[in-house]
Image: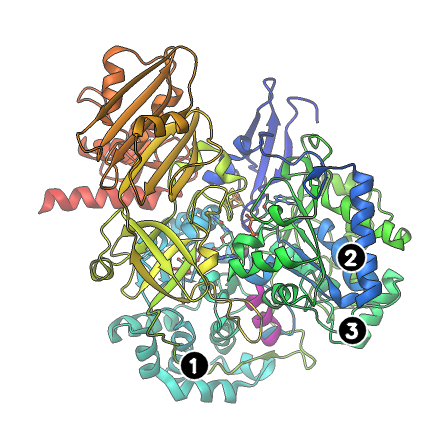
Amino acid sequence: MATGSPTRTTCPYCGVGCGVVATPQEDGTVSIAGDRRHPANFGRLCSKGSALGETLSLDDRLLHPEVNGRRAGWDDALDLVARRFSETIAAHGPDSVAFYGSGQLLTEDYYVANKLMKGFIGAANIDTNSRLCMASSVAGHIRAFGSDTVPGTYEDLEEADLVVLVGSNMTWCHPVLFQRLLAARERRGTTIVVVDPRRTVTAEAADLHLAIAPNSDVALFAGLLDHLDRTGLRDRDYVERHTSGLDEALAAARRRGFPGAMEATRLPAEQLRAFYTLWSRSERVVTAYSQGVNQSVAGTDKVNAIINCHLFTGRIGRPGMGPFSLTGQPNAMGGREVGGLATMLAAHLDINRPDHRELVRSFWGSPGTAARPGLKAVDLFRAIGQGRVKAVWIMGTNPADSMPDADAVEDALRACPFVVVSDVTRTDTTRHADVLLPAAAWAEKSGTVTNSERRISRQRAFLKPPGEARPDWRIVCDVAARMGFSEAFDYRSPAEIFREHAALSGLANDGTRDFDISACAGLSESAYDALAPVQWPRRPGEGLDGTATRFFAEGGFYTPDRRGRFVPTPVAPPEVSEEFPVILNTGRIRDQWHTMTRTAKTPRLTSHYAESFCEIHPEDAEDAGIAPATLVRIVSPQGTAVVRALVTERQQKGSVFVPMHWTDQHAAQGRIGAAVLPAADPVSGQPGLKFSHARIEPCEVAWYGFAVVRNRPETVPAEYWALARTDGGWRIELAGAARAQDWATYAAALIGRGEDPETLSYSDQDRASFRLATFSGDRLLGALFIAPQPVAVSRTWVVGHLAAPAIRGAERLRLLSGRPGADQPDPGPIVCACFSVGANRIAAAVADGAASVDAVGEAVRAGTNCGSCRVEIRRLIDAATLKTAV
Ligand SMILES: Nc1nc2c(c(=O)[nH]1)N[C@H]1C(S)=C(S)[C@@H](COP(=O)(O)OP(=O)(O)OC[C@H]3O[C@@H](n4cnc5c(=O)[nH]c(N)nc54)[C@H](O)[C@@H]3O)O[C@H]1N2
Ligand SMILES: Nc1nc2c(c(=O)[nH]1)N[C@H]1C(S)=C(S)[C@@H](COP(=O)(O)OP(=O)(O)OC[C@H]3O[C@@H](n4cnc5c(=O)[nH]c(N)nc54)[C@H](O)[C@@H]3O)O[C@H]1N2
Ligand code: SF4
Ligand SMILES: [Mo]
């Protein structure tokens, strides 16, 4: 941990699981680089990974436990948690308490939380945000394979001739893996197909984009199965030897067939045919999928409709082929391995099987294990709201924003008699905590995570926890001990927990379960410390090297008859609502992570999008009377949100898209979870977060504003605001329903007063437009721009002044105008976050003759680090070419 020594660890963001080398510097900062030896990324990092060093600052960190909002000692806080949980269990039974965890916990944290709930409290009410993320994949895998197995590896994406991305915006959400895929396309000419109702950046990079109607994936893949059958592509040998249930699945597919697929997807016949032909002709095909598949009320059927096609053609488990679930969180897989969901037991054992429960019980030496599955996330928060669950402990997740029907979730937390939250910072969820526990964060924690391709990597601490923060496993064990279970939770290190987890995976396994890492059961502390990334399974006696493992090429499924199962996937017609006719789709943007608790700390990452938005098709916008860049209210039966209108043809008619990221911490009314429908898939319990019924309305706005300020204001006096960090301060988008009496007073409240202030301002007669800049000494303290329409100032240029060491004379006046002079280039909105390159600089490079993405890179560096902006650069080049062509 000494300053200057590099630590090899793993990125805490997405499921690609990139290796990171972190090197603390003399000046207290940490330099971050990709780990060239890590088999997930071979040295590459995306914009989020590259900016990790900028998220380590301690402002906003929770440093001490709190009880009822007041600082408390660890002993008091832990005693209280243990006492209240024990008392609640004694009075109302084990099912009256619950844990709600996260795929961002480490495997070791997760293992002990699951052990405490399922083994020692004796209920299965431990669910996690993976219910919102991977539950449909888990359920689909179990239905088809008898186990939650991802058959393939990342290399398969590089060795395939055809890669179909279903409901995945991989360019932004799994950027490094996407760059690997693009590099493979350069080498071997891979065809990429994207299935997504929106024309995302990923769709733009694809060879074929199927802009299907929302939620019509089951019909698309049932139609494909029928097509494969008609064109004689059944792998008779594989189907006969290794599968069961084809007849029913085929019958269901035939009923709908090609016409059914056309009707449901609303794709032109030629496009559909082209896709089916491509899939038929490419033996090496990987169908990779993510939340457009999982987050649906038909999510499990979508998964099985895809797997059916791979089983039918025997295209599974061999190089370059197979269904591939892209996991979201860094440890979504690890959570599943320890059985962190309410429907699972540890180590891929089955909670519904008495023999498995007994195996776990005797291994743990626990009084009993939960005898039935517990409450799934949506039901869990409902049960809290109804008073059936009376004490809940939330760890590493922010359900007040990320759950559907999020206002109801907040009501439930408000009503819950006892809420414990372990987090690293304050969030919309922590405001409901009776006990708030400061957890150690990424840089301070040691353990393991498992990525999308089943590869276990070490996360290694390189900083000391600040204040009194403690690692999650330790907090859980301390509470367990106080509840009377000290012997079973007497761990001294994460390595000890990992060894136990590994041993359990091998217990009475003998090849009957997919998850077996018992080769790790004897790892010494130093061997655990040195553990190189390793893919499971690792059965007894197997080495711990980097070799790739695959499943099911020769059958060997984990069903009772060891056959893979076809699952019939009937197609349900989409629900329509007259009152709420618009489909609300939600998801991610490139540079923010979930509820922004870490990514919003770095100016680089807030420059791509500084506020939330709603993508609307131009005709829908016009019909609703919504002009570009004005504010739009999204209304659903659950709740509302207000965000900026982004009018674009990338969005299909009848649907809108809003990012999931913004919370009350950074915006006034940006919590889109409040408007999201809580309907869930009947098999997996995963909510359909991509499909809510809504209505869009223009907002009544009297004035729009834009401000830059040095210090974050305690409150922002406006109905609408969105705050983002910049170098040297904050930028704020504003709007209000009534004009201020005196804008100068308003500005002073927002900006504050520094030493030796000088204020310049301009106002038109009726106060509809107003501009003000206040300087303190040589430096800008803040500026405010007010207009009756969305404020047209150059954001990137104005924001740049906060960090400027000195602004004098004419420059001060120029700032008031909100635009650079002809002699100063306006960088434009930031496209490349890694090198902070704006759209205008890229356009200028294109105008100067840079005709390819690489040429732009050479000229202005944009797109040369993580590459996740390359599609946007391509878009700018195309737009310029089009302009000169017409
Ligand atoms: N930048 C960034 N990266 C991340 C994350 C992040 O927060 N930020 N989070 C990580 C996590 S936890 C996850 S789960 C992954 C998610 O990664 P992705 O699943 O790739 O991301 P999303 O944006 O949630 O959704 C993907 C796409 O599904 C589409 N979609 C909506 N409805 C349908 C439908 O009916 N059918 C089909 N085929 N597509 C549909 C949406 O339009 C959207 O473009 O990203 C991970 N990576
Ligand atoms: N509308 C809509 N909602 C969605 C989605 C969507 O697409 N649309 N996607 C869903 C999906 S796929 C996911 S994965 C979820 C994600 O949703 P959440 O899990 O709620 O999102 P995060 O912001 O990642 O929350 C993680 C929390 O853990 C804290 N934290 C970070 N490190 C640690 C640690 O080491 N220990 C502890 N104790 N805390 C830590 C962070 O500060 C943060 O508050 O959102 C889901 N919700
Ligand atoms: S792709 Fe980016 S966010 Fe995902 S693990 Fe790699 S560096 Fe982290
Ligand atoms: Mo996720």
Depicted 803 relative to depicted 419: above or below: above
Q: Is residue 598 visible from the viewing direction of this image?
A: yes
Q: Quadrant of the N terminus?
A: top right
Residue farthest to the left, as pictured: 886
Q: Is residue 14 above or below residue 308?
A: above
Residue 371: give its label: 3
Magenta segment range?
Answer: 134-143
Q: Which residue is mark 1?
A: 571
Picture coordinates of residue 647 (x, y %)?
26, 52
Question: Marks 1/3: CA distance?
Answer: 34 Å
Q: Tag 3's secondary structure?
A: loop
Q: Which numbered disc flags the more N-terminal residue, 1 or 3? A: 3
Q: Is residue 140 magenta?
A: yes
Report the predominant secondary structure element of the magenta stretch.
Answer: helix
Instruction: Tell me where residue 636 appears, x and y as whole percent.
Output: 40, 64
Q: Pointer 2: what residue?
A: 518
Element on which disc 2 rests: helix
Amino acid type of the residue that numbered disc 1 sits on in the rendered structure: Val
